[in-house]
Amino acid sequence: KIVIPILWDDKTLKQFLKEAGEENVKPVDKLTVKPRDVAGKESEVVVLSS
């Protein structure tokens, strides 16, 4: 499963990432998802650049 937070500001994003245990997530410009990328993963948080 991939979680992509939307409509966030810096404060709420930091709080969300902390609660999700994903504090070291770097924003990416583009996300391409392939079946092999998600196979066997429990979950992943992806932050898209605005």
Image (cartoon, grey):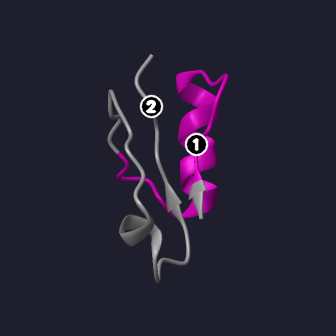
Report, in whole angstroms, how far the alpha carbon at label 1 lies from the one at label 2.
Answer: 7 Å
Going 42% across and 52% down the picture, which residue do you hit? Answer: 33
Which structural element holds mark 1? loop
> Residue pushed farthest top?
50
Which structural element holds mark 2? loop
> Residue pushed farthest front?
35
Going 37% across and 48% down the picture, which residue do you hit? Answer: 25
Where residue 38 is drawn, which disc sits there? none
N-term mark: 1 or 2: 1
Quarter of the C terminus within the rendering: top left
Q: Residues within 10 Å of mark 2 (few under 14, many from 20)?
A: some
Q: Position of residue 1 (x, y in %)?
A: 59, 65
Q: Does the segment drawn in magenta span residue 21?
A: yes
| Relative horizontal placement of residue 8, taking residue 29 as reference (left or right) | right
- The kind of residue on which mark 1 rests is Ile
Q: Which residues are magenta?
A: 3-25
Going 49% across and 62% down the picture, which residue do you hit? Answer: 44
Q: Residues within 10 Å of mark 1 (few under 14, many from 20)?
A: few
| Relative horizontal placement of residue 30, taking residue 11 as reference (left or right) | left
Q: Position of residue 20 (x, y in %)?
A: 60, 60
Q: Position of residue 42 (x, y in %)?
A: 55, 78
Q: Nearer the viewer, residue 26 or 35?
A: 35
- Tell me the residue that label 1 is attached to: 4
- The kind of residue on which mark 2 rests is Leu
- Tell me the residue that label 2 is attached to: 48
Q: Position of residue 10 (x, y in %)?
A: 53, 25
Splitting the image into 4 quarters, where does residue 7 fall?
A: top right
**Label pair 1/2, CB-CB below 8 angstroms:** yes
Going 46% across and 77% down the picture, which residue do you hit? Answer: 39
